[in-house]
Amino acid sequence: MTALTSNLSLTQNTTTIIRPPYFYISGFTGIPHMKYYYVFLSLVYIISLMGNTFIMIVIYVDQSLHSPKYIAVLNLAFTDICETTALVPKVLDMFLFDRQFISYDQCLANLFFVFIFLFMQSFNLTILSYDRLVAICLPLRYHMLVSHRSMFQLTGAAWAFAVLILLIPVGFITRLSFCGSVVIKSYFCDHYPLYSLAAPCSDVLPNDVMSYLDPVVVLFIPMVFIIASYVCIIHALFTITLPKDRAMKTCTSHLILVAIFYLPINITYICFSFIPTNIRIINLSLTSVLPPMLNPIIYVLKTEEFKESSKRLLKRVAQRTVGPVKST
């Protein structure tokens, strides 16, 4: 499919920028029985929405969870809801109702919102790792280093940094001319498949640089910090007298979240050029939707403190619904 004939040309100084009115999202082409995958995505989205909403309600209602750590957990749940909402409904609308054309501006917005929440997942996991590092390795200084104020500052800084580092590649895309194909070989307006369409008639080197720099800053460096923090945590658990069982349960739940998020997406970026397009698309789609669904399940099952708070909330709801049981 070639560029649409009604391309919009913008003149800035002496440079003409050609912007197509629409892009075409190719999605999962040539894959048999894809309708079942869309059903799966719908179920994952519903479970993710319900689970993360439940986490936010429990943290808001239960005063015992109004601690600095749960500011990061609340932000993670909010990010999970936003990420799946930015991605799954649009994917289902495009491919179930054959609406695979997306306007230029909508495409950039889709790219921005999908990636901003993906970046924040990584930063939230890093903040939770910092919380565990201080709590176990520096327990006497925990309330000084990890306060409500410092956690709000860390979370706010993460959001600001994520927006800044994402506005740069989006800004670079607005300077590109798309004079060839408008078919994006992905399931959303992915960065690399989008800017590579402009390669025949624009200098995409700045976009290439950002496509390598962003994963390093957003994925690799946080992952290295998390691994280093857990090396320190494991050393502390074996050398300092601590209630190890509770500490290990909390750390285990966090490590599971880290593994589910970082391993698939890092493998995809490292082996990007060797993975067939359809396999890459499915792997990235699973990486985008499975962690938000599994995060609340893991927290409920692995974190004793949150499990007890959930039981208290459900018990109160049941008592208000059914009413007090009268003794005979």
Image: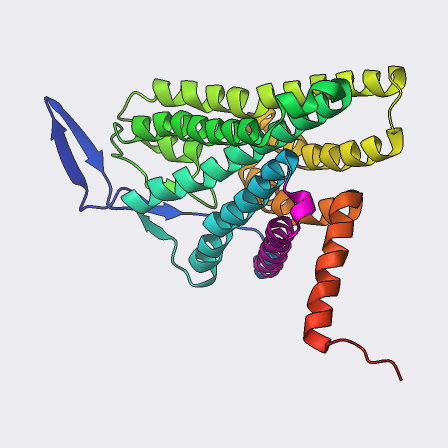
Where residue 284 sits, quadrant-wise, is top right
Image-quadrant location for residue 194? top left
Between 124 and 88, the one nearer to me in the picture: 124
The residue at 36%/18% (across/down) is 205
Answer left or right for 185 relative to 137.
left
**Magenta region includes residue 247:** no
- Could you tell me if residue 279 is visible in this image? no
Q: Nearer the viewer, residue 187 or 74?
A: 74
Q: Which residues are magenta?
A: 38-66
Residue 117 appears at what percent x and percent y? Answer: 49, 39
Q: Position of residue 133 (x, y in %)?
A: 71, 22
The number of discs equals 0
Q: Is residue 89 left or right of residue 263?
A: left
Where is residue 237 drawn, in percent x and y?
85, 21
Above or below, 161 against 328 in this view is: above
Q: Is residue 196 left or right of residue 54?
A: left
